[in-house]
Each structure stands twice: as C-alpha cells, then as structure tokens.
Image (cartoon, rainbow, N blue to C red):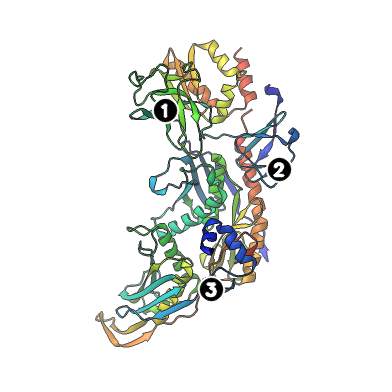
Amino acid sequence: MTNSITVVDYFLPGEEITDIKSKERQTIIGPGLQRDKNKPNSLVVTQAGRLHFRAPNTYWIENRKTRYVPKRGDLVVGIITKKSGDVLKVDIGSAELANLSTLAFEGATKKMKPEVEIGDIVYAKLLNAYKDMEPELVCVDQYYKAGPLGVLTNDGFLINVNLKLVYFLLNVSNPLLGTLTKKFPYEIVIGLNGKVWMKANKAKDILTMCRVFEASENHSEKSISDTCRGQK
Amino acid sequence: MASSEFPQLKCELGVLSKSDGSAALAEGESVMLASVCGPIEVKLQKLLTDKTSVECCYRSKAAEGIQDRFRETILKNICETALMASLHPRSSILVNLQEMQNGGQLLSCAVNAACLACLNAGVDMKFTFAAVSCFLNKFEEFSFVPPINENEVKALFVLVFNSTTGSIIASHTEGSFTTEQFQHGLKLCREQSQFVFKFFKESVINFDKDIE
Amino acid sequence: MAEVYKSLNPLKYYRDYYSHDIRPDGREFSDIRPTIINVGSIKTADGSAIVKIGKTCVTCGVKAELCQPKPSMPDQGFLVPNVELPPLCYSKFKSGPPSDQAQTLTQLLADIIENSKCVNLEDLCILSDKLCWCLYADLICINYDGSIVDACLIALIACLKSVTLPQIDYNPALEVKQVNLQIRRPLKVNFTPVAVTFAIFDELNIY
C-alpha cells in the first residue's frame, strides 16, 4: 500500500491547494490541513511540511513535529504523574495531562485496584480526545481485555522521538526494526505520541537502539532502507 | 531614490533541542534567537476557555525594561492573529525571543525569527508573516540597511505582512515623516516582503530535507 | 428591545447600524465621543489635567523635580511618563506591579514624546551638566472604556501645556540653588500630537 502514497509538494501555512484529485468531493484530511468553508474544492495548509496524498482521497501534511496533539483511538505511551482517588493523571506529552481511571485496567474492580505507582509507564489507548476536555485513556479494549495495553515494567527505557519517525516505525514494512532484531533480542513499545519504550538484555543494546533512532530522525526513509540493506 | 540593497538573511532552524521549534535568524547585523513551545500546559491565571493563550517573552541583551514589554505586546498581537488559536483551547503557546546582536532592525528580525520558529514547531497557523524594516535617513532617502550613524535616521518603519492576502498585520514607526513618505515606505516594504517569504520557504524546505 | 437584540446577535446588531452609516450611539463614523478636558484641577501638582472621552477617564499630573543631567546628554532634562491601570478602572486589571498593558502604554507615550519632539528636552536644562528639571508625568486611568491611548495622550499634552516651572537661581561656584516660587514660567510645548483609535469591522469599511 505504501507505493500509492505520493508526495505532492512543500507547503507553508496559508497556502491553498486547489487541484484536489479525490473523487466526488469526498476528501479525508489529516494533520496540517483545514477545509475552506467558502471554497468546497480546496484545502488550506496550516502547518509547514510536505503534502502527502494517498489515492483515492486522503491528504495530509508531514513534518518533523515533536509536540503531540491527542487523537481518539491513538495508542500512546505515558508516564503516571499523579494519583488522586480513582483517577491517574498521565503525561502523554500533550498540553494537558490525560485521565486514566484505575478501573480501566483488565480485571480491576473497586476493591481490586491495579498496582500502579507514580512514575510508572503505561501503554494505553485514547478513549476520548476532544479539544475542550481532558484526554481520557483506557488500558483495556472493548471486550475489557488488556491485550498489549497496561503498565510497562520498570526495567525498560523511555525516549522521545519526533512524530515522523514514529509513523515510520509503525509502518509494518519498515526495515529498521527487522534489522535490529537480527542483531539482538529486544522488546519495544511505540506510542503515537512520540514516546518509545524499549527493553533489551544488555544496556549496550538499549544504547544502540537510542543511537539508531536519534540518527534516523534526520534521515529519509530511502536512506534508512539502504543502510539496513547494507547490514544484510 | 531607494537603495534596493536588502540586508542579508541567514537562518538556522531547530537550533534548540528542548523546545518544539526554534530558529536563529540574522538580518544584516541583527541576530535573534527564537523558540516556540506549544501547545503546552497553561497557567491557571492565563487560561482561556475558547482558545490558546499566546505568551511572548522578549529578552534583550541589556537589563530588562519596559521597552521589552512593548515589543512583547507587538509580537503577541502578531502571533495571536497568525496562529490558529481556537484549535487548542485551555493551552498556551510560548514564543520566546532572545536578542543576540542589535544591528538596527531588531523588531523585524524578532518578528521574522518568531515566524520561522513557529513554522519549525509545526504549530497550526492561518498564514505566515514577514516583517520588513525600512529606514528614512535625514537626506530623505529610503533604505533597508540602517545608516552607519544612528543620528542619521529620520524615521524607521517596521511593517508586518500577511502571506496570503498581503495585508498589513502590524506596523511600528519611529521618528517623524509625511504621509507620502509612509506610503512610499509601505510600497517598498511590501515588495521586499515577497523575498522574505521566499527566504522562509527555502529555509524550511532546506531544514526538512532528509539526509539521503 | 434593542438591548435584547444586541446581546442575542451582536454582529448583526452592529452591521444593521453600520449599513446605515451610523453608530449605535448616533454618531457619524468620523465623530469622536464627547470629550471634556479639565486643566489644573490638582493644586499640589506642577501641572494637571483630567480628560474624559465618552466614559473613558484619565487623569494626569506632572511633578517637577530638580536633578543632575545624564553625562551622555548634559544639555537635556527628563520627561518621564508613567501610566497606571488600577483595578478601579476595569475589573480585568489586578492590583500589584504594573501590568504588561500599562508598561506598553507607558512606552508608547514615551515614544510619541520622543518622536514628535513636542517638548524640547533642552528647555528643561537649567545649567549644562549640573542641574535640570525632571518632569514625572503620572497618568492614572479612572475609567477604562476604550480609546485609552487617545485619552492618555490628550491628558498628557493638556497637562504639559499647563505646567509652570518656578524660577531657579543657581550659583555654580557655591553650588547653591534657590527656588523662587513666586516667578513661574510655563513650559513650552512645540507640537500637539494627537492619537486616533479606530477599528475595522467586517474588513469592508473603516469605522
């Protein structure tokens, strides 16, 4: 599917996109774009970046943003910063702390609370993210099963990367994580908010991963793929 | 009548690692460092329920004074017009500026650096903005480069333009001048602003270019 | 009825008036609100003025002090404006150190004085490098209802025009100064800068 993505051009805020290719005026817009009420067949750019288009009708802007803006359904990594009663406050890198109820863990009840301490790292899903409300997290899916969600162990390591790299890493066909797997075993949790949690057997391996991600932030996908191929 | 020479623009984006966006801009002899953070958590006192509160902090090289507050107000007004504040209510966007070197066109340099930092941070904006300083010396000549002797400046115009409509979003003047002179200065600045916008685009594209 | 309409649909309320080229209070677009100036109402100051533009009210008082000129500008005296926006004038303002807005206004007035050269600072010098006048112009807003810059500037200029300075007999050899309060001469104000505040509504016309 990645082949059908085309990079259109570089845009600055305020510039207009008039030649929309989508059919029947149904355009799906991603970050960095706004609709113009008065002109139904054009979009206004609000962030500096490269315009991407995926057939048939999806447009979005990609840039090296680091600040995360919560979106409903996103899987994020956060740090517990406050505990007040049944509600945990989680730092997910957005403007406000997100709420996570202690009941939103698998098997949790009023009496059986999960063991969560301040400073713990959780992998959670954004249940709600309205701009007028605090974002709300859950650690269970719609069947009240945790799946991969929940508290991450304390022997991992957390780093922040820019959002462009996150999208790259979350693409299943990316060669980077596969190449690393060949070198050493590791566990990784990538949050859409730019926080990445890692765990490996040796501290040296963790550091290698940090360096790899740091370097990848400034490289193009092609250059990363080429380097990975060089590593056999 | 006017010398078409414009002070050379040089910039570096993403110079600060801990802020969301940053830019160091040299406009002729003036150098400014700008950093933008946001949207981030807001102080309760400055919380706005319907939009982002834009906070500007200007630091000059010398001791703090009310002149800095004046510049902050100008910058804040510009940023409030340009940023899409309603997208992130109950948050704040911080725009910090540090004067590095004063070469005569501090204010326009500060405004341009702030714009570059906003672009670098990827904050949602309605349009980009560019400031142009125009000097009128005592021989009634217009120039974009400050005269070597400060006493020769009769008037200074700083005009900030909107990239989409080309309208003025802020104007600041010093000294005394006639309406005709202002109109002429405005015309010169407007023409020049196109080059500044072009420079912005080139700089941002250049920064975003990946290492192949 | 009009009040209800105004609060329900404020934009339309104004647009209806403006389409008939008139403001809601019956003024033409180019008219300013009724303006009253009262000069010399504060007896303890060396010059004073109270200005009302509509409901906006600003009072200004000038206090003159003797001091030594700055070494860099030995022939010039000082004129220092200071604007205060106390909580009294508008609930938005809090007490405490001057707000950003007050500081901005102060700087704006200082710039206007400097750019217009309405007061020649050399007139304030009594003896070069030794003695000069320092005029502290304190502006206090009593009621904040728009056009604050206009009101402050009118108040400041009216006040400066009313300033009288006593004669100083200074003996540089003995460094003795004698203030002769009986003989007072007015301060020379060369120009009268005027500020006009206007808004653009709907980007169509200037009101």
Tell me, yes or no, whether dots 1 and 2 are on the same chain: yes
C182 vs B59, left or right, is: left
Specify the subunit that label 3 lies on: C
- Element on which disc 3 rests: loop
Q: Which amino acid, mark 2?
A: Pro
| Whether residue C190 is situated above or below residue C87 in the rendered picture | below
Kindly identify the amino acid type of the residue bearing the numbered disc 1: Leu
Q: Position of residue A74 (x, y in %)?
A: 53, 27
The circle on residue A40 is 2
Seen from the viewer's position, the closer of residues B212 and C199 is C199
The circle drawn on residue B81 is none
How far apart in space, not on screen, are marks 1 and 2 (Cα)? Answer: 39 Å
Q: Residue at x 53, y 38 (%)?
A: B14
As helix, strand or loop, the secondary structure at mark 2 comes to loop
- Observer-nearest of B102 and C18: C18
Amino acid beneath label 3: Ile
> Is the residue marked by circle 2 packed among few (<14), some (14-19), or many (20+) residues within 10 Å?
few
Name the residue beneath numbered marker 1: A100
Verify CB contact (< 8 Å) between mark 1 and mark 2. no
Label 3, on which residue? C32
Percent of width and height locating residue B71: 48, 57
Marks 2/3: CA–CA distance: 42 Å
Q: Is residue B177 above or below residue B52?
A: below
**Residue A17 falls in image quadrant:** top right
Picture quarter with the N terminus of chain A: top right
Residue B203's x, y, as percent?
Answer: 61, 42
- Look at the numbered disc 1 and give the secondary structure of its residue: strand
